[in-house]
Amino acid sequence: MSETPRAVRETAFAKINLALHVRERMADGYHRIETLFAFAEDGDALVCEPANGLTLEIAGPFAAGLPSGSDNLVLQAALALRESSGTREGARLSLEKRLPVAAGIGGGSADAAAALRGLARLWDVSCSPDQLAEIGRALGADVPACLASLSCFGGGRGDRLRPVDGSALRGRPLLLVNPGVPVPTPAVYAGWDGEDRGPLDLGEPPAIDTGWRNDLAAPAIALEGEIGEALDRLKRLPGGDLVNMSGSGATCFALFADSAARDDAASMLRAERPDWWIRASRLR
């Protein structure tokens, strides 16, 4: 499939919650969280090309079953940006789904953020980062963080962001593991036991802290025990500095001190569980 000279390419970088502390269930039914966002170098790929209307094509290893109509966040992002900017431009959007769907690593939110970034360039619209973040917030709580795709602290629903110095995290070898089990986010949050286990304390710059936790891991494991197995296997691999689940699951991760240890761990795990999705990456 050839691209036009004006095609704009964006990567929808995988979002990693290095920590996710649930503090309370708010009156509106949402939960107040404190999280440290980081992003992997890997992600879905989005191409934006000039066109008369707005269309979306989806391909790739995880494209099966994904809607390409108006209920897809990529098209919703395009429509929201067009309405906000007042442009009448169109676009042909091609999304390659390289990462598992609904897996706790950004998914549709990262794709929507990539669409906002790419179309703002393609259409040459004047939107400040704050304006794009406001558009993104209406699409999903993770979209504002995914817009910059840089390490940051997230409060509120995860959409109240504070930049952090990511120098101690940047380039850290990362191993992503998904056992291929579905865990609906509302069900995971509904299973949270309501206990506030304390705030997320970050140094400056944040350095890896084994006290970082994901308070959604326990309810996710209660729904799908294979997530617990993934975490246990990652913890048994040599060389890992931090093992946790990202978001509401089911993707789990381990950070390593060097790429050789990560690659050895990936080989061991692939031999043990060839049916799992396993990706060696780095934090960006």
Image (tube, rainbow, N blue to C red):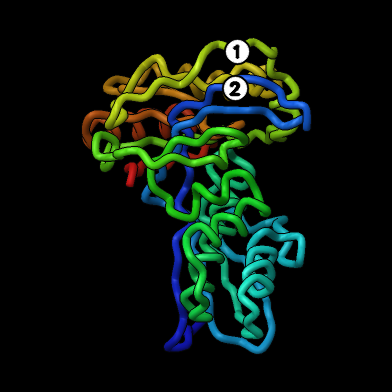
- Direction from residue 258 to residue 279 in the image, left or right: right
- Direction from residue 174 to residue 217 in the image, left or right: right
Taking the spot 46% from the left edge, 81% from the top edge, the residue there is 7
Amino acid type assigned to the residue bearing label 1 in the image: Asp
Query: Tag 2: Cα neighbours inside 10 Å, few (<14), some, or many (≥20)?
Result: many
Query: What's the distance in space between the residues labelled 2 and 1, CA to CA?
Result: 7 Å
Taking the spot 59% from the left edge, 33% from the top edge, the residue there is 156
Q: Looking at the image, is 45 positioned above or below residue 126?
A: above
Taking the spot 67% from the left edge, 54% from the top edge, the residue there is 139
- Residue placed under numbered mark 2 in the picture: 22
Amino acid type assigned to the residue bearing label 2 in the image: Val
**How far from the left and from the top, in percent, is residue 262?**
29, 33
Quadrant of the image occupied by residue 152: top left
Q: Earlier in the sequence, mark 2 or mark 1?
A: 2
**How far from the left and from the top, in percent, is residue 90?**
63, 83
Q: Looking at the image, is 245 positioned above or below residue 160?
A: above
- Residue placed under numbered mark 1 in the picture: 196
Taking the spot 27% from the left edge, 22% from the top edge, the residue there is 239
- Label 1's element? loop
**How far from the left and from the top, in percent, is residue 250?**
59, 32
Count of marks placed on residues:
2
Q: Looking at the image, is 247 positioned above or below residue 219?
A: below
Q: Are marks 2 and 1 in contact (CB under 8 Å)?
A: yes
Quadrant of the image occupied by residue 225: top right
Q: Looking at the image, is 11 positioned above or below residue 253?
A: below
- In this rendered view, identify the residue nearer to me: 181 or 7: 7
- In this rendered view, identify the residue nearer to me: 241 or 122: 122
Residue 57 in sight here:
no
**How far from the left and from the top, in percent, is residue 20?**
52, 26
- Label 2's element? strand
